[in-house]
Image (cartoon, rainbow, N blue to C red):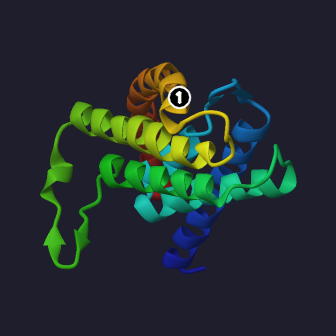
Amino acid sequence: MKTSQTQALRKLIILSLLVAMTFVLDRFLSFITPVMKVGFMFIPPMIAGILYGPIEGMIVYAVGDLLGALLIPKGAPLIGLTVCYALSGIIYGLFLNEKPLKLFGIDFTWRKVGLIPNVLIASALVCFVVDLFLKTAVLNTLSTDKTYWGVFTSRLLPSAIMFALHVALAPIMLQLCKSLKKSFINK
């Protein structure tokens, strides 16, 4: 096989493994509290975003969620949640990937900020904007006995805990991905 074909096949295999890991972490190794799902489902899409970028992070998160909803449903599948997961994957890829990004002729040089601002910004956007605001809006459509702000306030503490978990694990994932790139991906 040609080198580009080998790299494309390697990328497909890695992304497939990350989708499978997302599915397993979501359906078997997470638990649902009355207000929030707590688990490590965010790690494989974060790795995909770090290694390959926003589109791959989005695909891993969205496909992993859809597989879980179709193969082992825990209630009715909600496309709004899948969109929220996809948005989180995009955020991981935008802020944690080192490749230069150009959209519509605009070079995003803000990506060259240090590790800590990137991790903090990505984690804050995912945990507070996507998980707290957007997912609360999606989940609030299921419940008619609570207001949006009632659900929101009950999800505030779990979101803060997940933020701390994201901030703690993201640098570890960045180091892991750096090692993966050297030893396996860039061969």
Name the residue at the front extreme.
145
Name the residue at the right extreme.
72
Does 5 sit above or below residue 180? below
Q: In front: 73, or 75?
A: 75
Residue 60, image x, y percentages? 59, 56
Q: In front: 90, or 172?
A: 90
Q: What amino acid type should be assigned to the residue bearing mark 1?
A: Gly
Q: In front: 14, or 83?
A: 83
Taking the image as drawn, is residue 28 in sight?
A: yes
Q: Residues within 10 Å of mark 1 (few under 14, many from 20)?
A: few
Does 25 sit above or below residue 162? below
- Mark 1: which secondary structure? helix
72 vs 155, left or right, is: right
> What residue lies at 25% left-to-right and 65% top-to-bottom?
101
> What residue lies at 59% left-to-right and 57% top-to-bottom?
80
Residue 187, image x, y percentages? 47, 59
The number of callouts visible is 1
Does 95 sit above or below residue 145? below
Does 21 sit above or below residue 175? below
Looking at the rendering, which quadrant does residue 30 occupy?
A: top right
> What residue lies at 61% left-to-right and 66% top-to-bottom?
12
Taking the image as drawn, is residue 38 in sight?
A: no
Query: Which residue lies under the disc numbered 1?
Result: 150
- Where is the N terminus found, in terms of image quarters? bottom right
Residue 124, image x, y percentages? 35, 35
89 vs 35, left or right, is: left
> What residue lies at 54% left-to-right and 23% top-to-bottom?
154
